[in-house]
Amino acid sequence: MHGRPRKAPKPEEEAASVAKAQKLRALQTQFFSFHHNKIHSPSQTHLRNRKRKQKMHGRPRKAPKPEEEAASVAKAQKLRALQTQFFSFHHNKIYTKEAVELSAKLLEINPESYTAWNYRKLAVEHYLSQPDCNPDWIKSVLDDELRVVENALRQNFKSYGAWHHRKWVISKGHSSIDNELRLLDKFQKADSRNFHAWNYRRFVAESMKRSEQDELKYTEDMIYKNFSNYSAWHNRSVLLSALFEKKAEGFLSKEKVLPEEYEFIHQAIFTDPDDQSGWFYHLWLLDQTVTTDSPLLASSWPGHGYDVFLVEDRCYNGSAFSPFTALHSDSGSFPIVLYFNQPVGGVSSSTVTVECGFNKNEDLLWKPLSASNSQTARVWVAHLKIPSSDLLSTVEVSVGHSKGIISTRGFEYSHPSMFSFKVHVQPMERDFSQVSVAESISLREENFKIYGSQSEESIINSFNQLSIKNGHESTASNWRSEALAKEIECFRELLSLMDCKIGKLTLARLLMAYDVMSYPFANKLVHSEEVLELCSDLMKLDPTHYQYYKDEHSMVLLQKVTSSKESLLQHCFQYKDSVSSAICGPVCLRLNNLSLSRMGAFEKLLWVQMLDLSHNELQSIEGLEAMQLLSCLSLRNNKLRSLTALEPLRKLKLLRVLDISYNQIGDHSIDTTRYLCSSPLSHSVGSESNKDETVTSDVALIDNWEAFYIFKDFNLNQLEIVGNTIADEKFKSVLVKIMPKLKQLDGKLLG
Amino acid sequence: MDDIPPYPPIDPTTFDLIVIGTGLPESIIAAAASTASKSVLHLDPNPFYGSHFSSLPLADLPSFLSSHSTSPSPPRSPSSDDPNEFSLLEFATRPLYSSIDISTFSPNLLDQHSRKFNLDVAGPRVLFCADKSIELLLRTGTNQYMEFKSVDATFVGDNKGNLWSVPDSRAAIFKDKSLGLVEKNKLMRFFKLVQGHLAGEQDVKISEEDLQSPFVDFLNKMGLPPKIKSFILYAIAMADYDQEDTGVCRDLLKTKDGIDQLALYNASIGRFQNASGAFLYPIYGQGELSQAFCRRAAVKGCLYVLRMPVTALLVDKDTGCYKGVRLASGQDIFSQKLILDPTFKVTLPLGSSPPLPLKEKLPFFSLKDDKGKIARGICITKTSLKPDISNFLVVYPPRSLFPEQVTSIRLLQIASNLAVCLPGMFVLYISALCNDDDQGKKLIHAVMNTLLTVPLDSESNAAVQSETAEIGSAVQDETSESSSGGPSDSGEEKPTLLWSALYSQELTLGQVDFICSTPMPDGKLNYNDLIDTTFKIFQEIYPEEEFFPETSLENPEVDGDASPET
């Protein structure tokens, strides 16, 4: 997208684009029906023109008159003749004056002809390689090119080919760049929002080493002429970013610059809150204010000071074990999870040191947990081997003492931190496999008991050990929260003047950011009630973006639930009376019936082994891969629509019990998300899938490759899938084939 | 009047229409009548075009003003004992200007270059880019004889010498430094409401009840703060009287009219690509307009004779019907219809009443009710009132300068790039409606004292000083003490006055006339009302004829021509 980073669409962008797409689609449908039926009445021609009109900032075009239609037919004929001749020159590599002039003529009529531009490039190279070539001549050749481009741009100044050709000519370095700036001024006067011109302007400014400050002033002038100018605001953000990065004079600290920018954008937003360009810039400013440059470690598992009880056999009898930090593992290892506040790369045994008596630091392999296969992620995991001999040992983890952890925005992790925990090992007493065959986990209401109600002090105490807090240090200097407080006040005022959807959304974002920034340790979310209210309000006001607001609502709700021990404990339940389960710990976090559409607050939930998310409205469980200790998960009665939505679960090596019953998997014949993950039939999966060639050749499996892709790595004992369209007997038999270790499917024991 | 050259007799001697005076309304009528294929004789006693709408050299302005400040005895017409069938009714001029006060602080400089100045007699005046005068110019093709430049901005002044820019567009609201965020929001929403209403959007219709209520009440209802209200009422809708004081307000604006004014203003901004403001001003001064219409008339066959006073009206002895005029040259010219410059009056023989038929034909058009007077001032300075901008309008809303000020005072600064003065100089036109000359002087002086430094080395200056003393010490104190502060002057010197002319102009004729007279310059900023009246007069004398019929004119590409040069 022309070098602009692609972000998930915000409601304000989406509203426009959805409306536009809808309109376009309706037009298109009608157009095609006319087209196929060869209907050519004036009203239909009009329709065709409306379609063309879409690009033009609402400037109307007139319907062509019959004589104009005739002219365009004649023009097409002429163009076709020109083209034929041009191609013959091109193929025969004829670069005579006549041939080159012909291509100029062609481009003047049709600037979109890329072949012709390329031909001209070849012709220029051909001329410049002539032995008798002198500087004057070079200049005249290149000047000719510039003239052709100018003519083409006059025809269509949104022609990619023409702008590109101009860049190419200028890069040759024989032409006056000052002239380019003058030309641009002319173009930008004619259409101040044309992003081609702005793109080219950045190129020219860079080539002539024009200072960012001068360009910044230019954007200001353009904005003063008309502040509905995405391109100008965008260029402003680009220039400011460059100046911040350079630490140019006057731009050393954001503290000085950002308040002025806020002041500037307020003028636009208050003058016309319906104009979207200003809100975009505001969002960028908010991002600049909130985001600390260098990444921080938000939380980890185990946390600092934990006593971790590793149980190879769940049938321990001692209540001395904390139910919150006891971990059963059948794989002989346990994970260390690092949760950063933004995606980072470069986590390795050289940047993170784990010191303990039973593992060599160099042996640890740190893996990023991200949906894509990129080498950056917020969550990184490494697995430590469980010591066989030591009954008690201390583990020290140091993060970032040597350089190398870098955020995706290019900032170094610069707050070296250290945490330590103790590991207690409960040696295996019984044969594990016998027990687990018989055991069946059922996350039903009757199986739960709330904690605290019986004032089980030991449990409360061990819960305290989890030390729920926002892990990162308060690096937020005062100005950031001051800036946010000012913004909050400002937008409260705007909302007191008028009803404004984007205003409400912005206020909600500001309040959330403010809470996170101002109370990193206090665990207080003073504004969460207000934010929840704003989100509910927006869901009603702007039904088109219901899902977005719903997601935001869910996130805030989760932040609220996890913000204090008291509130979190209300969601912690004891599974059955006994603490004896071979599969999962006795504590279940129940976030059911909260009408969540999205899961979040993972950094505070890394300890959870048993999670009940049933009876929500989840469509996606993105981010759940961070909960590495999960062994038992219920997603019963949600709105998951595809198997590929389960992708995050592939990374949960300890997951044994999964309930995805009563979702909508298979309801929708077209699963758009499936194209986001690679097919096992393509080469990209390669090494992962080659372990069972015979499986991939099975026809049933080829038909169900998503199932294969998702489930083949699972180590499930128990799966509930009933209540999904996809879950017919045939499919179940496929599942059994994919997961030979599965012991129980939809409540039936497998032989 | 004694240097009238021996004119060759005018031939023919009979016309469809005789027009006396070349002010803008007369010129438009002459052009319209000529276009309608009438034979027209257009006379003017002056050696220049424009009469009371003219732009004059610096030295000529005072003599023109004073020649119309007294009632000179009309030149004796050869005889009233003409043995023919007509009675003669003698012409006289009525005084139009009073309290003329000319001050020169730099005599040498200005006298040497008197001809470099083109000073508007009826200033300040501009053309809104979308108003009737522009439409008329374009429709008639008269624009080809003129060039315009943009008046780039409008400011509202206060008694501290500050000039606040008027946030008259979306971009201007955004840019404005003096408005708070809430004010910006309210103002822009008000503009949007008006735009939506004008565009006929259903959900933003302004109710009929609101439309009929006073505009100021509607603005209050919209919750607009006083500052913005004042901007809208006086600097955009150009109201003359204090809208919030029904006791003194003689032009209480209805919401409907206020919105029409906003629409005009809004349509004016950005109409022409190279005009950044809402207004245009003709190069060489407003007098060009009259002249352009005269040229237009001449092209259509109208006959022009300047320097030709008219001495008497020829009336049929028996019927009392108008027949023709007697010129100063002694020649008698006859016509069906006659249009007179408003300063002419016909003196009836003492003790006699007009012949009966004349009475019956008493004026179909008479100037409106008593509207008082208008005080005008012209000042010349060497520096602009505001750096970096040379052509602009300033409005002082009622009571912005002193408590007793009940009318808006408007000031137009025009620079030498409009060819109205010596390079590097600026002409300021000031005007305000008033009840009498004293009140008028006080209003003009209040503005001059706020914005200008009046040199002390002239005897006429004493007059200015003493005048200001009368305004009340309060104003004096405020202006002098505050002149240093404020964003607009930011420590800069106030421009020094080089020359000034102050005068009051009558707005009424005070007597009912029986001959068709054109309107005199009014107190408005543009020509809209004058053009309306002119149109009515034309319709009255030629009810059958169309006023400049729409034709596929010689120059269809008028739009391009009308735009001011860059």
Image: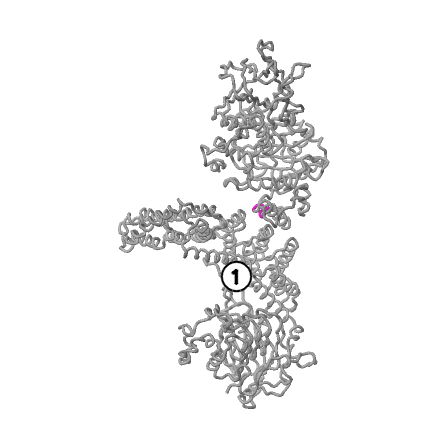
Q: Give the left or right position of residue B32, taking residue B411 as reference.
A: left
| Residue B172 sits inside the magenta stretch | yes
Task: Give the x, y percent position of residue B371.
Answer: 67, 30
Chain of the residue under label 1: A
**Relative height, residue A360 to residue B427 (above, below):** below
Q: Give the left or right position of residue A235, taking residue B102 as reference.
A: left
**Relative height, residue B552 to residue A277 (above, below):** above
Pick whichever, A574 or A470, lies toward us.
A574
Q: Which residue has dot 1 on it?
A: A9
Task: Give the x, y percent position of residue B120.
Answer: 57, 29
Q: Residues within 10 Å of mark 1 (few under 14, many from 20)?
A: few
- Badge 1 amino acid: Pro
Asked if one can make out residue A569 in the rendered structure from this viewpoint, the answer is yes
**Relative height, residue A26 to residue A464 (above, below):** above
Task: Give the x, y percent position of residue A548.
Answer: 57, 64
Pick whichever, A675 or B450, lies toward us.
A675
| Residue B168 sits inside the magenta stretch | no
Secondary structure beneath label 1: loop
Q: Residues in magenta?
A: B171-176
